Image: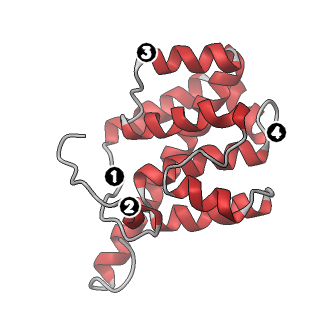
Amino acid sequence: MKGDREQPIWRIATGKSDKIVCGSFKGLLEDLFFLTKNVSSVIKVSRGKLVSTAFRERLMLAVVSVYGCPLCSWLHTGGALRSGIAEEEIVALLIGSVDNCPEDEAVAVLYAQHWADSDAKPEPEAVKRLGQTYGTEKAKVINSILHMNRIGEYSFSVGGLFLYRVSFGRWGK
């Protein structure tokens, strides 16, 4: 992406990345608009319909592997462990690998990585493949998860920057 510096994947996976998802206010509004437009999908996510907790955590770990937020990494790693995902798979997802991922979820996890890397503007081919693989309704639920996750990423990134500044560089970022 424009303006980003290349970083070794281990820095992102270990939370030692300086890539921060502050995005833009416009991006935040787009996420909020998407979620209000798709309230039924948000309800299905919160009730665990169509997508299991483990699947949801895999999607979130895929996004974290792109954004590199240390707090989000910690939070979603805990959620993934509670949902029954093996440590080896979590580590693999954090470095961007889908080798240990269940086959039926791999397309969605790769889509989540692409979605995050393209700043929530995936290629039309990727959107089409997601819809063909999971159906329209489940694809909407997957996109809702990604938008909800990005709103959380915005919040934690801003919180991390605040901690970094008030602690004179000792915490956060």
- In this rendered view, identify the residue nearer to me: 43 or 67: 67
Please, what is the three-letter code of the amino acid marked with disc 2?
Val
In the current view of this chain or complex, which residue is farthest to the front? 99
Q: Where is residue 64 drawn, in percent x and y?
A: 50, 53
| Category of crowding for the residue at label 2, using alpha-carbon neighbours closer than 10 angstroms: few (below 14), some (14–19), many (at least 20) | some
Please identify the quadrant where the C terminus is shown. bottom left
Please, what is the three-letter code of the amino acid marked with disc 4?
Arg
Residue at 53% x, 36% y is 110
Q: Secondary structure at mark 2?
A: helix
* Alpha carbons under labels 3 and 2: distance apart: 30 Å
- Mark 1 or mark 4: whose residue is earlier in sequence: 1
Q: Are marks 2 and 1 in contact (CB under 8 Å)?
A: yes
* Alpha carbons under labels 3 and 4: distance apart: 29 Å
Tell me which corner region of the image, top left, top right, bottom left or bottom right, holds residue 5.
Answer: bottom left
User: In the rendering, which numbered label is found on residue 124?
Assistant: 3
Residue at 51% x, 67% y is 71
Quick check: 32 above or below 5?
Answer: above
| Mark 3 or 4: the one toward you | 3
Please identify the quadrant where the N terminus is shown. top left
Q: Secondary structure at mark 4?
A: helix
- Mark 2 or mark 1: whose residue is earlier in sequence: 1
Residue that badge 1 annotates: 22
- In this rendered view, identify the residue nearer to me: 32 or 153: 153
Please, what is the three-letter code of the amino acid marked with disc 3?
Pro
Residue that badge 2 annotates: 158
Q: Are marks 3 and 2 in contact (CB under 8 Å)?
A: no
- Mark 3 or mark 2: whose residue is earlier in sequence: 3
Q: Where is residue 41 drawn, in percent x and y?
A: 69, 27
Q: Are marks 1 and 4 in contact (CB under 8 Å)?
A: no
| Category of crowding for the residue at label 4, using alpha-carbon neighbours closer than 10 angstroms: few (below 14), some (14–19), many (at least 20) | few
Residue that badge 4 annotates: 47
